[in-house]
């Protein structure tokens, strides 16, 4: 339903936080009552990440409580 | 495009229409109109981004530990609610409603359950007494705002385009235009959808979910999030109950199962049966002090 808008939120929050550094992985914490569908988020994520420092990054999910819906953390690409 | 949803036209903007003045303004561009680097909001406090390799991993809440080294790249802890921005604006809306003494209700249901019809009847019933202003949310058309206006109340139509729910900033903008006076009721008719309006706080006092008898008694079990989030549930189209084999006791049981505390009101917006209970509910809500006041 609304997962495209949500993934765009996620991408812009992480992109802003990461600055110019490239992100390889984002982890979300989602509770059973959060009312979001991880599969749909994954589907939209690639699209929303295109053209940002998150391009090509993977999206992972952690279980959380209640209606939690958080960006837990993100992993930067190794700087050679 | 989003696989699960009907957001088919990425160019659809979110617009606001005032049917009285015939004004239409664009609130937001389409959801695919590019990532929003234009807005300059968000204040992410980058709490002392110093590296600190000593602290334990896996501890979440609020310590100054933004950086940890994972097995590969550097892991940056964020712990940020995805809907933080919406919730912040919703909080501001709520403060405004409470400060002004406006009762704001967020009406949610599947398409066609009778939200607009109930509002029309409510406006007629309270005419000359309590002022009602309405924010109408639909993907397309200003039909519902026109109906509200014809019934005698002021309305602003929000068209969400591809969006399947209202968000707090849309309500903030529409409220600015409506400027509901103290003592009035602001009815927010959400987009007909039993899924995601549950996720988005608009700043309302309460969500009121409407279920209509032809939809079947099992809706509360199929869409538990919405019914859990509601402070009151209206069972509408009770006039049709005999024709659609609606089992009221079972419906109540199902609502109770996901939400034991919701107030239950049975009515027919068509025949007027049960409308007195709904109006009494509104009177009670208007008298009640907002939580925390
Ligand atoms: N029989 C009967 N029909 C009703 C009742 N309430 C609404 N309707 C009819 O149901 C249809 C949909 O009503 P609306 O008020 O437009 O429903 P809605 O929830 O606003 O619909 P959307 O805004 O499109 O989601 C209309 O044809 C109404 O006349 C009722 O109590 N009984
Ligand atoms: Mg309607
Ligand atoms: Zn939605």
Image (spheres, grey):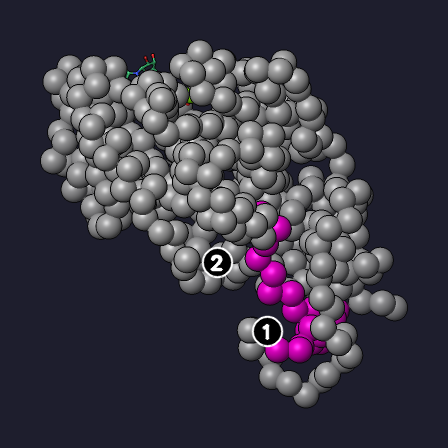
Number of marks in the rendered image: 2
Pointer 1 chain: B
Q: Is label 1 within 8 A of ligand 3 (CB to nearest ligand atom)?
A: no
Residue B293 appears left or right of B140: left
Q: Residue at x 42, y 34 (%)?
A: B184
| Residue under pointer 1 | B62
Q: Residue at x 78, y 79 (%)?
A: B50
| Residue under pointer 2 | A68
Callout 2 and callout 1 share a chain: no
Q: Which disc, if any, is residue A72?
A: none
* Crowd rating for badge 1 (residues with CA inside 10 Å; few <14, some 14–19, many 20+): few
Percent coordinates x, y for residue B280 in the rendering = 23, 35
Percent coordinates x, y for residue B80 in the rendering = 61, 61
Q: Quadrant of residue B78?
A: bottom right
Q: Which residues are magenta?
A: B63-86
The one of A22 and A72 positioned closer to us in this rendering: A72
Magenta stretch containing residue B68, yes or no? Answer: yes
Tell which quarter ligand 2 is in. top left
Q: Is residue B2 above or below residue B60?
A: above
């Amino acid at each position: 339903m609304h997962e495209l808008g949500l993934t765009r939120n996620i991408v812009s929050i992480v992109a802003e936080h990461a600055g110019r550094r490239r992100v390889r992985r984002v982890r979300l914490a989602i509770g059973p009552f959060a009312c979001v569908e991880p599969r749909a988020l994954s589907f939209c994520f690639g699209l929303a990440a295109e053209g940002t420092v998150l391009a090509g990054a993977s999206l992972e999910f952690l279980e959380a409580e209640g209606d939690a819906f958080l960006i837990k953390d993100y992993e930067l690409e190794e700087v050679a | 495009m989003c696989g699960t949803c009907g957001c088919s036209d990425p160019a659809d903007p979110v617009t606001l229409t005032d049917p009285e003045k015939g004004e239409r303004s664009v609130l937001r561009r389409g959801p695919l109109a590019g990532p929003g680097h234009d807005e300059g909001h968000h204040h992410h406090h980058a709490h002392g981004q110093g590296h600190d390799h000593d602290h334990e991993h896996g501890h979440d809440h609020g310590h100054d530990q933004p950086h940890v080294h994972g097995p590969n790249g550097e892991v940056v802890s964020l712990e940020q609610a995805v809907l933080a921005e919406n919730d912040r604006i919703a909080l501001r809306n709520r403060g405004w409603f409470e400060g002004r003494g406006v009762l704001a209700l967020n009406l949610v249901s599947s398409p066609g359950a009778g939200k607009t019809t109930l509002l029309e009847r409510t406006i007629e019933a309270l005419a000359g007494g309590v002022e009602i202003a309405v924010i109408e949310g639909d993907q397309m058309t200003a039909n519902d705002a026109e109906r509200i206006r014809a019934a005698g109340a002021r309305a602003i139509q929000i068209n969400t385009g591809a969006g399947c729910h209202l968000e707090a900033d849309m309500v903030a903008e529409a409220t600015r235009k409506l400027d509901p006076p103290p003592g009035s009721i602001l009815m927010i008719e959400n987009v007909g959808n039993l899924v995601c309006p549950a996720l988005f706080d608009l700043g309302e006092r309460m969500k009121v979910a409407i279920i209509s008898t032809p939809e079947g008694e099992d809706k509360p079990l199929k869409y538990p999030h919405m019914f859990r989030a509601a402070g009151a549930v209206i069972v509408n189209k009770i006039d049709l109950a005999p024709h659609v084999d609606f089992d009221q006791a079972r419906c109540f049981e199902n609502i109770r199962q996901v939400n034991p505390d919701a107030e239950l009101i049975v009515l027919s917006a068509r025949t007027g049966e049960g409308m007195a209970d709904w109006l009494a509910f509104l009177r009670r809500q208007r008298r009640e002090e907002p939580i925390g006041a």
